[in-house]
Image (cartoon, rainbow, N blue to C red):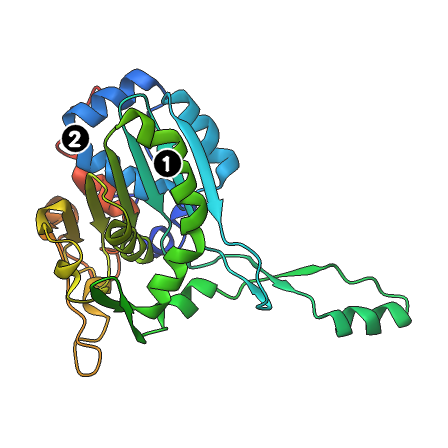
Amino acid sequence: MNRRIGRTIDAVLNPKDYPPFPDMTTAESFRRAWQDNPMWVFACMAHAAYGEPADMQPLFNGFGAATRFYESRADNSPVIRGRQAFLSVWPDKAILSFRGTEGAETIRLKTPGALRAAAEKIGWALPEDLDTFLATDILDDLDFKVTPYLKSRVHNGFLKATLDLWPAIEDDLVALCAPSHMPIFVTGHSLGGAMALIAGMTYPFERIVTFGAPRVGQDIQRTIAEPSRHIRYVNGNDPVPRMIPTFYPFLYRHHGELRTIVDQNHGGPNVLYDHSIVNYAEVLRETLPSDT
């Protein structure tokens, strides 16, 4: 029995260390994959959102796409958030991908001005920003407050994370995609899936495809009237889709068309490994022709 790369704790926590679209480099290979197995492509796009822009840019250049990357803006908070997304635009379509929770993210903190001034008095020069391993995505995940949004009510942390990136994304959707009237899709894994769904409440995407996404809020169907626009994948015993509270006063519910996949050929469901986006992509690739 071959061992899956995605069935490790490291793959769960550090998907950026594993290349998306393995063994694919050309526009023709991407075109064939999109034609034969678009759901695997969406899983790889959600995986790619974890990657560094410097690594992903040449990959998508090779696929024939123009790509824009987005990250959190600095604000008055001492924490500079690590939220990320990217938009890839082909002549006939565009795909927006949101990054999920980063397990070992190096993020930046603004150095307090008073601390820098005090350090200068004794001859030390502190940088404007300091690096730390505090995972700020966890702060978004744990912000459970229910907030009204459009015709629904949603998780406050997921909403703030999405709206942080949305102005720049919306500008590019209008500038790059709207004139051609091309279909635009949105995807994401875990926290990125929750952000993709909220983006889908905000903009009329052709389709929303999420992987291992948590519950996002209440009455999402009031804002997205067609549940079929959202395909929601859950892999085996992935715990994240079950984690957000369903009890009062939260009453969170899932949205969309549920599609379950199970890794029966490589050990079966596993609560430790099934959340890995690497594993989601590996399972979905089994239906892709081997010569792609």
User: 28 or 70: which is nearer to us?
Assistant: 70
* Amino acid found under the numbered disc labelled 2: Asn
Residue 22 visible to an observer of this rendering = no
Is residue 136 rendered to the left or right of residue 153? right
* Amino acid found under the numbered disc labelled 1: Val
How far separated are the C-alphas under marks 1 and 2? 28 Å
- Mark 1 or mark 2, earlier in chain: 2
Question: Which residue is painted at 31% across and 74% down in the image?
Answer: 144
Res. 178 image quadrant: top left
Question: Which residue is painted at 27% across and 47% down in the image?
Answer: 203
Q: Which residue is mark 1?
A: 174
Percent across and percent down for residue 224 are: 16, 53
Q: Which quadrant of the rendered structure holds the N terminus? A: top left
Is residue 229 rendered to the left or right of residue 59? left
Q: Residue furthest top?
A: 28
Relative to 126, residue 86 above or below:
above
